[in-house]
Image (cartoon, grey):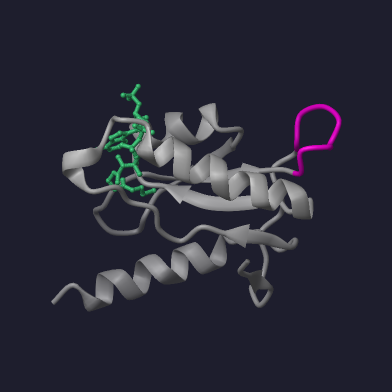
């Protein structure tokens, strides 16, 4: 029943995916009973330290304004919102540039995929 909606969501994510090399964090979640205790920020900070060692940017999609703020606090820059063609949440593209980049990091161009990398 929901499969076509997820297929559409995936197609939108693909279309707006940055074309330059980066690490893509597809999902992050903390057990609801453990949320708001700093676990998510600690997990992401650990992950970012590894990326910073590699000099690698990070990209993810924020699914609401509240987690968008968490990502901004952790060094991400928000891109323009993605409005889905059907009903659904507004989603923001989030980019965390390389740590040694001087000044504000420009939001990367989108393009056809193929270069997703994992640690
Ligand atoms: C988003 C999430 C991973 C953060 O982990 P966490 O351990 O709760 O976060 P921390 O305690 O380190 O930081 C708290 C901040 O996380 C964000 N946050 C916490 N719970 C949230 C929730 N249910 N929905 C959205 N953002 C949430 C807020 O920015 C919060 O700060 P605030 O209280 O000032 O608004 C976690 O809340 C979660 O799993 N949410 C549901 C799934 C989800 O939205 N995943 C992200 C998809 S992009």
Q: Is residue 9 magenta?
A: no
User: Which residue occupies 25% across, 37% down?
Assistant: 35
Q: Is residue 117 left or right of residue 102?
A: left
Q: Nearer the viewer, residue 53 or 74?
A: 53
Write down which quadrant ligand 1 falls in: top left
Please tell me in which quadrant of the rendered image residue 6 appears: bottom left
Q: Is residue 101 left or right of residue 6?
A: right
* Residue lying furthest left: 1
Q: Nearer the viewer, residue 70 or 105?
A: 70
Give the residues in magenta.
98-105
Q: Is residue 24 left or right of residue 90?
A: right
Residue 13 image offset from top left, x and y in percent: 48, 63
Residue 84 image offset from top left, x and y in percent: 36, 55
Q: Nearer the viewer, residue 63 or 117?
A: 117
Vertically, is 5 above or below 61?
below
Q: Nearer the viewer, residue 50 or 80?
A: 50
Vertically, is 86 above or below 73?
below
User: Which residue occupies 76% across, 44% down?
Assistant: 98
Q: Is residue 97 left or right of residue 34?
A: right
User: Which residue occupies 72% across, 43% down?
Assistant: 97
User: Which residue occupies 75% across, 39% down?
Assistant: 106
Please tell me in which quadrant of the rendered image residue 27 appears: bottom left
Please tell me in which quadrant of the rendered image residue 36 appears: top left
Residue 40 image offset from top left, x and y in percent: 39, 41
């Amino acid at each position: 029943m929901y499969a076509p909606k997820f297929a559409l969501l995936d197609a939108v994510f693909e279309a707006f995916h940055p074309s330059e090399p980066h690490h893509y964090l597809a999902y992050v979640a903390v057990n609801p009973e453990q949320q708001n205790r700093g676990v998510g920020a600690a997990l992401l900070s650990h992950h970012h330290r590894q990326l910073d060692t590699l000099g690698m940017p990070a990209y993810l999609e924020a699914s609401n304004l509240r987690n968008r703020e968490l990502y901004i606090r952790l060094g991400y820059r928000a891109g323009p919102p993605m409005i889905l063609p059907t009903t659904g949440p507004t989603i923001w593209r989030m980019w965390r540039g390389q740590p040694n980049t001087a000044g504000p990091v420009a939001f990367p161009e989108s393009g056809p995929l193929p270069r997703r990398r994992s640690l």
